[in-house]
Image (cartoon, helix red, strand yellow):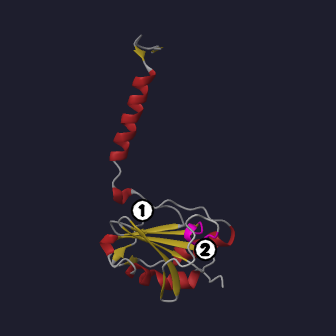
Amino acid sequence: MSIPHRSTGRTRTPRAALGAALLLAAVAGCAMTESDASPAAPSPSGKAATVCRGLHDALPGKVEGEEHSTDATDSPYTAAWGDPAIELRCGVDRPAKLTPGTEEYNPTSEAAEVNGVSWLIEEQDEGYRFTTTDRAAYVEVTVPEAYAPEIGALTDLAASVRAEVPRTR
């Protein structure tokens, strides 16, 4: 089936239009570098949203010696430092490893307390993800392996989390 093009009299096939759309998407994706990507913003509500906005305002200017990226995101629920980025997201969902009834639930998951803040530790392909375990909002920090030992980033964030995100227990 051909679709006539009114202005030139040429015909376009749906297959050609799809190909052009895919090419455009691929070219647009190439223009974005890894450092341009910002952490996906969660959408907390209620007390968690209020707590996360307070945390955002109290975050340190540097983590692991890396400057806070002011253009990484416009969200009051995310922050990033360095390249590759150390990413913080506040107001994320409860991790499946901490949720009874989920397939991933593991009450003996690895955790660590860093300067008064308890964190769930999850190894990823190229670093670690840490999520607070006993706070009014879940705060997630993803640290690339370039900053090994990755847990070091938590020392720079602990005072802000401790001050702005109250314990649940």
Q: Position of residue 57 (x, y in %)?
A: 53, 75
Tell which circle, 1 or 2, labels the residue nearer the N-terminal end. 1
**Is 41 rendered above or below residue 139?**
above
Farthest left residue in view: 146
Residue beneath label 2, please?
Answer: 137
**Which residue sits at x=35%, y=57%?**
34
Q: Is residue 96 magenta?
A: yes
**Amino acid tagged 1:** Asp
**Is 9 rendered above or below residue 27?**
above
Q: Position of residue 98 (x, y in %)?
A: 58, 72
In the picture provided, is 115 more to the left or to the right than 69?
A: right
Q: Position of residue 62 (x, y in %)?
A: 38, 77
Residue 71: assigned label:
1
Q: How many marks?
A: 2
| Quadrant in the rendering for residue 50 | bottom right
Q: Position of residue 59 (x, y in %)?
A: 48, 77
- Looking at the rendered structure, the secondary structure element under dot 1 is loop
Farthest bottom residue in view: 115
- Looking at the rendered structure, the secondary structure element under dot 2 is loop
| Quadrant in the rendering for residue 94 | bottom right
